[in-house]
């Protein structure tokens, strides 16, 4: 694949490369303070991404646009977002024991019991907290898994991200530019009793399923509900958030597949059930929801 990159793309790729190399060599608290400072600088400039985050958070919380409360929430959101990057630079140097010890998990039995029974699991997550840390915890407690990653630019950054995630024990399939058989590969994994983890509240394929989300229509990826409908895998919503300096993971009960209806109707019902759980989790931890892009259809239309 060709790698035609802009100067900005190359700068970003170089920054990530330096982060993975240098941050683990430096003391944790001072580097965390640097990332908070950078988050505050970006927040104070109120660029397009910060304004979009505030618009999304206003819909989620009902806070008035431009209110002091919304501004403070978006500041906490940017700090959470930059904390994610600080932590992924450190994750490769952390021991499995530390990652597991600092992960406060509710509902882990939903994964353990299904896998023990030979049934595949699809964990579906919104873009919250540190999903890479959650993945490292899952591998650390004995459940290596397969995921799909958005193809980042430049290609060198995408390859570095894949190497980072593979180093944590994940199998990573590219969303685009691969062999075109992602769904078949994921279905094979869960039919064999394996685990799949997928981001599931923002559709990147233009083939998503329409759902109601915080009172308006959006599209979510069809993959997670379709896997549950077609393979019989347990679809488990997972909410990831920060708990002080540690991490929280809430794995909810399985989203049931309706016994009646066409495949399309079943997928739509499961997608809505999944989104309802996400709505509750985001409402409880809005500062850890990293949605800096347009999401709802009426916003995309504009």
Image (spheres, helix red, strand yellow):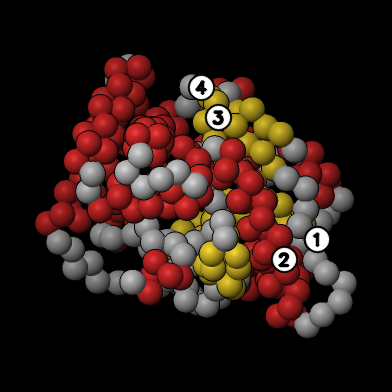
Which element carries disc 3, helix, strand or loop?
strand
Q: Residue at x 58, y 23 (%)?
A: 102
Residue designated by label 1: 256
Query: For numbered disc 1, what is the local secondary structure?
Result: loop
Estimate how packed mark 2 is, as few (under 14), some (14 to 19) or many (20 or more) residues with alpha carbons within 10 Å.
many
Please report whichever mark, 1 or 4, sits nearer to the chain's N-terminal start. 4
Q: Residues within 10 Å of mark 1 (few under 14, many from 20)?
A: some
Residue 14, given in percent of the width and then of the height, sits at 20, 45
Q: Position of residue 44 (x, y in %)?
A: 22, 36
Pinpoint residue 37: horizontal percent, then vertical percent: 25, 27
| First-in-chain label (1 vs 3) | 3
| Res 139 visible | no
Dot 4: what SS? loop
> Disc 4 or disc 3, which is closer to the eye?
4
Image height check: is 297 above or below 81?
A: below
- CA gap, disc 3 and disc 2: 27 Å
Dot 2 falls on a residue whose secondary structure is: helix
Label 3, residues with CA under 10 Å away: few <14, some 14-19, many ≥20: many
Asked if residue 218 lies left or right of residue 190, the reply is left
Q: Residue at x 78, y 44 (%)?
A: 110
Q: Please give the residue where the numbered disc 3 appears in the rendered image.
A: 247
Marks 1 and 2 in Cβ contact (< 8 Å): yes
In the displayed structure image, the side of residue 21 where residue 59 appears, left or right = right
Answer with mark 3 or mark 2, whichever residue precedes in sequence: 3
Q: Residue 289 versus residue 137: which sits nearer the camera?
A: 289
Q: Which residue is mark 4?
A: 244
Query: Relative to the observer, which residue lies in front, 115 or 103?
Result: 103
Q: Which residue in the structure is indicated by mark 2? A: 270
Q: CA distance from mark 2 to mark 4?
A: 33 Å
The CA span between labels 4 and 3 is 7 Å
């Amino acid at each position: 694949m060709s790698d035609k990159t802009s100067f900005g793309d190359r700068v970003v790729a170089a920054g990530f490369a330096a982060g993975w190399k240098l941050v683990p060599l430096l003391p944790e608290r001072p580097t965390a303070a640097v990332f908070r400072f950078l988050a505050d600088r970006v927040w104070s400039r109120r660029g397009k991404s910060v304004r979009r985050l505030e618009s999304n958070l206003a819909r989620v919380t009902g806070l008035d646009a431009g209110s002091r409360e919304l501004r403070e929430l978006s500041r906490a959101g940017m700090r959470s977002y930059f904390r994610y990057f600080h932590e992924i630079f450190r994750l490769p140097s952390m021991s499995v024991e530390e990652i597991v010890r600092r992960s406060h998990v509710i509902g882990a039995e939903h994964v353990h019991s299904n896998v023990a029974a030979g049934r595949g699991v699809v964990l579906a997550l919104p873009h919250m907290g540190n999903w890479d840390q959650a993945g490292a915890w899952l591998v650390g407690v004995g459940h290596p898994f397969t995921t799909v990653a958005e193809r980042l630019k430049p290609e060198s950054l995408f390859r570095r991200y894949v190497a980072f995630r593979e180093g944590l024990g994940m199998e990573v399939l590219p969303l685009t530019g691969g062999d075109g058989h992602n769904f078949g590969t994921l279905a094979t994994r869960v039919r064999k009793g394996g685990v799949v983890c997928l981001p599931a509240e923002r559709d990147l394929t233009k083939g998503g399923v329409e759902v109601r989300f915080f009172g308006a229509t959006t599209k979510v990826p069809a993959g997670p509900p379709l896997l549950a409908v077609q393979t019989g895998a347990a679809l488990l919503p997972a909410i990831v958030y920060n708990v002080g300096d540690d991490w929280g993971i809430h794995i909810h009960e399985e989203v049931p597949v309706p016994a009646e209806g066409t495949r399309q109707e079943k997928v739509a019902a499961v997608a809505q059930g999944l989104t309802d759980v996400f709505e509750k989790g985001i409402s409880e931890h809005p500062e850890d929801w990293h949605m800096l892009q347009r999401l709802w259809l009426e916003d995309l239309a504009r």
